[in-house]
Image: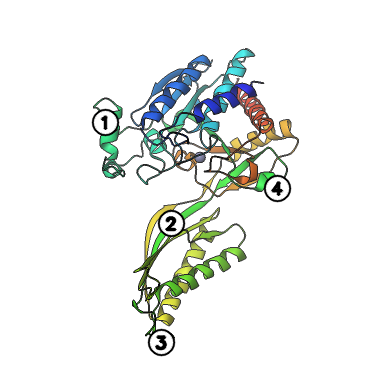
Amino acid sequence: MKTNALAKMLDELGRVSDEEGRLTRTFLSPAMRRANALVGGWMREAGLAVREDAVGNLIGRAEGAKAGAKTLLLGSHLDTVRDAGRFDGPLGVLLPIVALAELRRCGVALPFAVEVVGFSEEEGVRFASAYLGSEGYTGRLKAKTLALRDGAGVSVGDALKAWGGGKFALPKAAHRRGDLLGYVEVHIEQGPVLEANRLAVGVVAAIAGQSRFKVTWTGQAGHAGTTPMALRRDALTGAAEFALAVEKRARATAGLVGTVGALAVSPGAANVIPGQVGHTLDVRHASDAKRRAALLEWGNVAARIAQQRGLSVVWQRTQDNGAVDCSPELTAQLECSVKAVQGRSVSLVSGAGHDGVVMSALTPVAMLFVRCRGGLSHHPDEYAAAADLEIALRVMVDFLRRMAHQHAS
Ligand SMILES: [Zn+2]
């Protein structure tokens, strides 16, 4: 199979960057324009009809052999984080292109239509808001999102207008729900489970729900030399006690992860007691009920810590996505293909969010994870071995053949 072609495409696309010497490709940037042109060319070579939608999503479509056939969606995102690896996103766009080219070479005509979608925005880098590409594709982009501004003060709306040559209207959903067979995304795992299981690929059962908060602790700033310990209202020690409580509870609950990832201490001087601390809290679990139970408990813990330490604590929710269960039917089909190619399959929960989260509002979703070295991602050393890409490609081809067989009559 054409694994070499896939590896070469990943390399070439990995050099399409907005920054010299490292890979950074953000929503509607000049590099994205070049990436869409490059990937669009590969789509055409594979026999797909190529178009770009109003939010910069790149779409390659092949009509089905049967008249009025439904459409299977395959894809992932073409934007990247800053100083990114070359697999996160592009793998899920390029692998289906190569798989479809392979089927075409073998003379297999799929009875259903296929659309390969390269979403223009998933990482949330430029406008600190993720999934703009899939929101556009599914008709869920909101007017208020258009007002968000990037670091240079450019709004989403103005960036979209410039991208479209002066014109932009909020897009409607690209398809009606009843016209779709589902959405299947191939993505590197970005975690260590496949490596621990010595498997090249695995099937995702669910994408974890995710909540993010900004938590602000307020006490009293004061002189670090003259204020006795018993009279202090130190916002940082309160926040620290809370972070440890989060860690303890998450460690004790299977599948629960809680992270205090960014922390700002004010006034922030060696000789001043911290008067205010703002920190993030990111919480994820495949079960929404378990995530909410943990949040409820942490709310109570924070209130108790604040009361004992003479602090006030304020929570501000910045993100809330429910867990997404993958489609049992598509997942079972993928598992058959994984077992046929790899001998054994493993079921994974995705701790990271993916385009499938938004796509699940339009159609059933399934995901195939590919092992990446050390579980490392969002890093230039991100790496998936050629042998693993080969297995993932064979799984996709097998999956499409099975789907073709199922929908033949
Ligand atoms: Zn990704």
* Observer able to see residue 74: no
- Between label 2 and label 4, give the one nearer the viewer: 4
* Residue 49 figure quarter: top left
- Cα distance, mark 1 to mark 3? 59 Å
Q: Which amino acid does label 3 sit on?
A: Pro
**Residue 387: where, in percent of width, then height?**
69, 31
Residue depicted at x 62% and y 15%: 108
- Nearer to us of marks 2 and 3 is 3
Q: Mark 2 points at which residue?
A: 212
Marks 2/3: CA–CA distance? 35 Å
175 above or below 257? Answer: above
Residue highlighted by disc 3: 228
How many residues crowd around disc 1 within 10 Å: few (fewer than 14), some, or many (20 or more)?
Answer: some
Q: Position of residue 177 (x, y in %)?
A: 44, 33
Few, some or many residues within 10 Å of mark 4 (<14, 14–19, 20+)? few
Q: Name the residue under label 4.
A: 196
* 222 shown above or below 109: below
Tell me the amino acid under the disc marked 2. Answer: Arg
